[in-house]
Image (cartoon, rainbow, N blue to C red):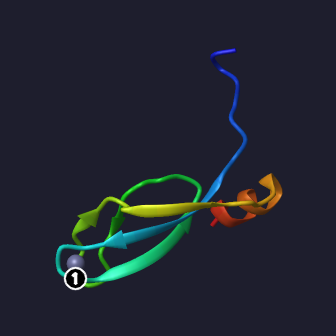
Amino acid sequence: MPDEIEPPRWYRKHYTCTCGCQWEDEWDCLCNDRCPSCNLEIECDDYVEIEMSPEEIKRRVAF
Ligand SMILES: [Zn+2]
């Protein structure tokens, strides 16, 4: 079905900025993040998918 809802996922993402700053972030999508040092928008260059229950993910994105 085309409008079937995918089960939620949780990712731990790794970013490397051109300024040399590296950091990790966790979220339910592979979106870009801003460098904590120079505020440049960076695409994640590595990630791992973490096993987490849909209830736990909902709780985390509710903020
Ligand atoms: Zn930076």
In this view of the protein, which residue sits in the foreground, 24 or 56? 24
Q: Position of residue 52 (x, y in %)?
A: 76, 61
The residue at 43%/63% (across/down) is 46
Query: Label 1 CB, ligand 1: below 8 Å?
Result: yes
In the picture, measured across the screen, residue 34 lies left or right of residue 54, that is left
Vertical position of residue 35 compared to residue 11: above or below: below
The residue at 63%/67% (across/down) is 63
Q: Position of residue 50 (x, y in %)?
A: 67, 62
In this view of the protein, which residue sits in the foreground, 61 or 7? 7
Q: Which residue is mark 1?
A: 20
Task: State the quadrant of the N terminus.
Answer: top right
In the picture, measured across the screen, residue 51 lies left or right of residue 23, that is right
In this view of the protein, which residue sits in the foreground, 27 or 12? 12
The residue at 82%/57% (across/down) is 55
Vertical position of residue 11 compared to residue 35: above or below: above
The residue at 72%/59% (across/down) is 57
In this view of the protein, which residue sits in the foreground, 41 or 63? 41
In which quadrant of the rendered view does residue 2 lie?
Answer: top right
Q: Amino acid under label 1?
A: Gly
